[in-house]
Amino acid sequence: MKLIIAIVQDKDSNRLSSQFIDANVRATRLSTTGGFLRSGNTTFMIGIEDERVDTVLEMIKETSHARNQFMTPPVNLDVTMDNAATYPVEVQVGGATVFVLPIDQFHQF
C-alpha cells in the first residue's frame, strides 16, 4: 500500500475529483492554501494498492496544468528602491506537487 498526497490548484481539483470517482479511487479532499501566492489549493490524500499508483499518478499529471498568472510583489518600504518593484510580474503556477509514501497499515471503517 502507498499513501499519495497530491496538492493541486483549485482550478484543477473538480476535474481530478471526477476522474477519481470514475476510476473508483477513494480520496480524501482537503482545502489548503499555498504559501507563495496564498492562493487556494486542494490536497488529496489517497490510500492505494501498489499496482494502481502509476494509474493515479497519470490521472494527476493529465489533469493538473501549469498556467501563467500575474502577481504584485509585496510592498517594500525601503525608499531606495525604484517604483518598478510595485508592478505586477508574471509567474508560473499550477501543476501538482505529489508525494508517494509507503504505509504499513490501511484501515477503512
Image (cartoon, grey):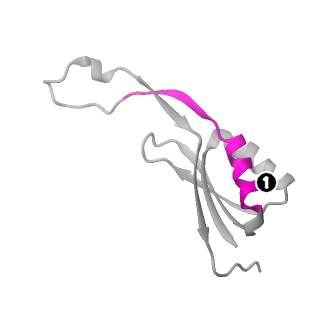
Of 28 and 67, nearer the camera is 67
Q: Quadrant of residue 37?
A: top left
Q: Quadrant of residue 84?
A: top left
Q: Look at label 1 and name its amino acid.
A: Phe
Helix, strand or loop for disc 1: helix
Q: Quarter of the image containing the N terminus?
A: bottom right
Of 76 and 99, nearer the camera is 99
Horizontal side of residue 95 vs 78, given as left or right:
right
The residue positioned 49% from the left and 47% from the top of the image is 34
| Up/down of 98 relative to 75, above or below | below
Name the residue carrying label 1: 20
Say few, some or many: other residues with alpha carbon within 10 Å of mark 1 (under 14 / 14 to 19 / 20 or more): some
Where residue 38 appears, as percent x and y from the top left, is 46, 43
Where residue 26 appears, as percent x and y from the top left, is 77, 63
Where residue 56 appears, as percent x and y from the top left, is 73, 55
Which residue is most to the left?
80
Count the numbered circles shown.
1
| Magenta-drawn segment | 52-72
The residue positioned 70% from the left and 78% from the top of the image is 106
Specify whether residue 39 is painted magenta: no
Specify whether residue 63 is painted magenta: yes
Where residue 61 appears, as percent x and y from the top left, is 68, 44
Q: Quarter of the image containing the C terminus?
A: bottom right
The residue positioned 28% from the left and 23% from the top of the image is 85
| Up/down of 74 relative to 9, above or below | above
Horizontal side of residue 5 vs 58, given as left or right:
left
| Up/down of 27 relative to 18, above or below | below
The residue positioned 51% from the left and 27% from the top of the image is 69
